[in-house]
Amino acid sequence: MRLRKRFTWSLAGNATSAAGQWFLVVAISQLGDVAMLGRYGAGLAVCAPIVLLTNLGLRNAVATDTQREYAIADYRHARAAGALAAVVVLAVVVLARGDAARTTATIALVGGSKLIESLSDLSYGIFQRHGRNDLVARSMIARAALGLAAFTATLWQWRTLEHALVAMCLAWLAVLVAHDRPHTRLLEPEQAAPSSPGWAALIRATLPLGIVAALVSFGINIPRYAVDVFLDDAALGVFTAISYFLVVISVIVVAVAQATLTRLSQHWAAGEVARFRRLLATIVGACILLGMAGVLLAVVLGGPLLEVAFGQGFAPHRGLLVQTMAAAGISAVAGVLGVGAMATRRFAALLGPHLAAQAINLVTSFALVRAYGLAGAGWALIVAMVLSLAPPLLVLARAASHRRRATT
């Protein structure tokens, strides 16, 4: 499948998925209340880093494994081990938090939805490796449409977030069973059970990638944690809703990443450094323009946009929307650079820089939110995204230096 066609399918799938997430938040704000949004935001903030950690970055690992270093069975066993670990860690965290019963139930159900998503995620990596971005898109479109319909109908009928999340999980599970698993088996038939060193070695190799993914998610959520600590549920609901505009920008970034990750990996593995750099620079330039357009839109139409999407109570928070769109533009550039870094398969090299960046992010975010409230949360989000630029830039520079030394 040609690169342009891959991008078109990836954009369609991610745009539909992002629209589904967006309208889910809108449904909560219209059919529920701000406190319900706050509970949902807390669920995402708690569960996303844990599930990303235990996912081990296997989707990107299988998509970039152009040399077939590991068997598909190794990836499947590693994903099963990661899912089991996620269940244990989520159970411990939920019990340790000691939240009210409804918040605990919400966090547990969001965690369940993320685990179902992680099973589809490995299939997506296999589809990408075979150039079948159309299968990824069809699955994402089905999950978005069926999940949103089930969630909204249940929330409208019962007016409880927990029932709605159960309905969404069942819809996602149906797509996994009816679409993702059958097509995965067609592309990569079941093999004999791998020896323990195979999938164990894969876990050791990809663990840094899982930690990095968790750190990135943790870094994005640190301002949300600070809002949860220093402000009330209403403020957390406002921040959760407006920060979803990050998804709007990330749609195109993720589409580009899915379309180009395998191509970048092939260029790097073949020693085609000039082509690698040219493709990466082109995408980065497009992301910069996209971020600037997002900020301009927020400045000109921010108030009316918030009012239409979430109600009149959100219109005064236009400044937070401008900050969020600026952060989204920076995040887009960081995401593309991260794709380039992953294409070099120097997974472990990303770990140290990300740890340092998130340590700075943690201190800065809590200080800003404590001092300036929601406005401080917006600035904290920008700081978090600026810090996220450093790790992939460092890895790309080191990889290029190592490649130059190896060829001289």
Image: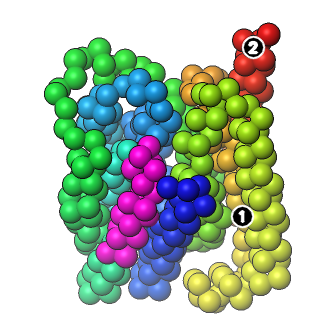
Q: Quadrant of the C terminus?
A: top right
Which residue is at 65% across, 48% downward? 335
Q: Amino acid at mark 2?
A: Thr
Start-end of magenta stretch: 127-146
Q: Nearer the viewer, residue 287 or 317?
A: 287
Q: Which residue is mark 1?
A: 324
| Residues at circles 1 and 2 in contact by the CB criterion of under 8 Å | no
**Dot 1: element:** helix
Tell me the distance, in whole angstroms, between the alpha carbons under discs 1 and 2: 43 Å
Q: Position of residue 258 (x, y in %)?
A: 54, 51
- Residue 32 lies, with reference to residue 184, above or below; the image says below
- In the image: residue 287, left or right of residue 227: right
Q: Main secondary structure of the magenta part?
A: helix
Left or right: residue 206 versus residue 287 is: left
Q: Kindly indicate the quadrant of the structure image that contains residue 300.
A: bottom right
The secondary structure type at the circle numbered 2 is loop
Residue type, label 1: Thr
Q: Which marked residue is nearer to the observer: mark 1 or mark 2?
A: 2
Magenta stretch encompasses residue 352 = no
> Residue 275 appears at what percent x and percent y?
73, 39
**Colouring scheme applied when the structure was drawn:** rainbow
Q: Is residue 273 above or below residue 110?
A: above
Q: Residue at x 62, y 89 (%)?
A: 308
Q: Which residue is mark 2?
A: 407
* Circle 1 Cα neighbour tier, 10 Å, few/some/many (<14 / 14–19 / ≥20): many
Describe residue 144's horizontal placement relative to residue 267 as left or right: left
